[in-house]
Image: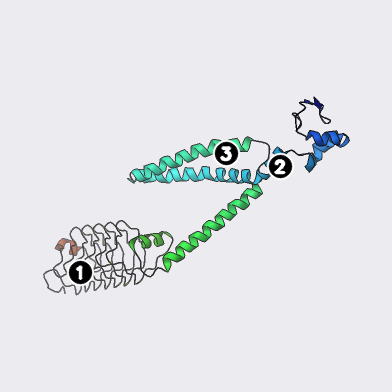
Amino acid sequence: MIVCPRCSQENEDSAMNCASCCINLQWALENSNEAGRDDLQREEGPPPEAQGIESVASVETRPIRGFLVIVLLLAIPASLVGALWNFAGIALGGGHRYAAGFWLWVVVALVCVPAAIVVLLRRQPKPNLLGGLRILALIGLTGGLLFGLMRLTLIILPEHTGRSLNIQYKLGERDFRGANLGAADLSEADLQRANLSRADLGRANLSGARLGEANLHQTDLREANLSGANLGSADLSGANLSKAKLSGASLANANLHQTDLHEANLSRANLYRADLSGANLTGATVTGEQLARAKSLEGTILPDGTKHD
């Protein structure tokens, strides 16, 4: 048996560290006077050479534990926010996509809460939060650079697609003047207040799109599908909407001055206070009741080919 010079604990002959105070027994036996000092443990702790392999390993893992604590503490509110966001999506009729996201965030929260409690309740070794913050800052910097590169790549694309346009809009881009989007699929797209003046949207699918207050001045929308689209207060002056499908679209307060709407389908479209002055409605599918709700019909060519005084 080996008696520990520091705490008098009896240990097996093969023991490397004391079972009670964890001091390195070989060093303690060789330095019994120094190992027996009470203040060494209370104030300074054992010198580096007295620490066992386990102590060194624990010190090295402190930054990692600190990082885990920070990530877990951030993941809890983030998961709750994500769950609430998806719950709101379900309430608004978002379907299975939001339901799956809701349960995913709930599972994340249920895993992170007990994990964070377990890590925080462990006393030794104490987590090195400074090291964890450095790791987190490095991850944030890397993510920011990747985000910037992705946004730059999308902006310098020579031609837009429906997918790239949606991504750029979500990243904060609003200026798409002159973009080539012929036959692009932009159904249900959120493009409110976007600048699409003089863009090519001929034969594009914009059914159900949100284009409120968008700038569509002199935009080519020939044969485009705008059924059910929200174009409230949009600027469509000088735009080409010939043979476009606008059934059920909202054009309330829209500027349609000198817009080409010949043979356009405007059945059930909302034209409340729309400015149709100088517009060409030759052959368009629209009722007199709809036109009566417009703000101005001065100089408008009506569906029968006559000009409104």
Mark 2: give few (<14), some (14-19) or many (20+) Cα within 10 Å: few
| Above or below: residue 259 compared with residue 39 | below
Residue situated in front as seen by the camera: 228 or 138: 138
Cα gap from disc 3 to disc 2, whole angstroms? 24 Å
Q: Amino acid at mark 2?
A: Val
Residue 165 percent location from the top left of the image: 37, 63
> Quadrant location of residue 68?
top right
Residue under numbered circle 2 = 56
Q: Secondary structure at mark 3?
A: helix
Residue under numbered circle 3 = 116
Q: Is residue 160 visible?
A: yes
Which of the marked residues, 1 or 2, is nearer the chain's N terminus? Answer: 2
Taking the spot 41% from the left edge, 42% from the top edge, the residue there is 102
Q: Amino acid at mark 3?
A: Ala
Residue situated in front as seen by the camera: 212 or 13: 13
Q: Secondary structure at mark 1?
A: loop
Q: Is residue 91 visible?
A: no
Mark 1: give few (<14), some (14-19) or many (20+) Cα within 10 Å: many
Residue situated in front as seen by the camera: 208 or 113: 113
Question: Image check: 42 left or right of 114?
Answer: right
Cα gap from disc 1 to disc 3, whole angstroms? 61 Å
Instruction: Give the label on residue 169, or none.
Output: none
Residue under numbered circle 1 = 242
Q: Amino acid at mark 1?
A: Ser
Cα gap from disc 1 to disc 2, whole angstroms? 77 Å
Q: Quadrant of the N terminus?
A: top right
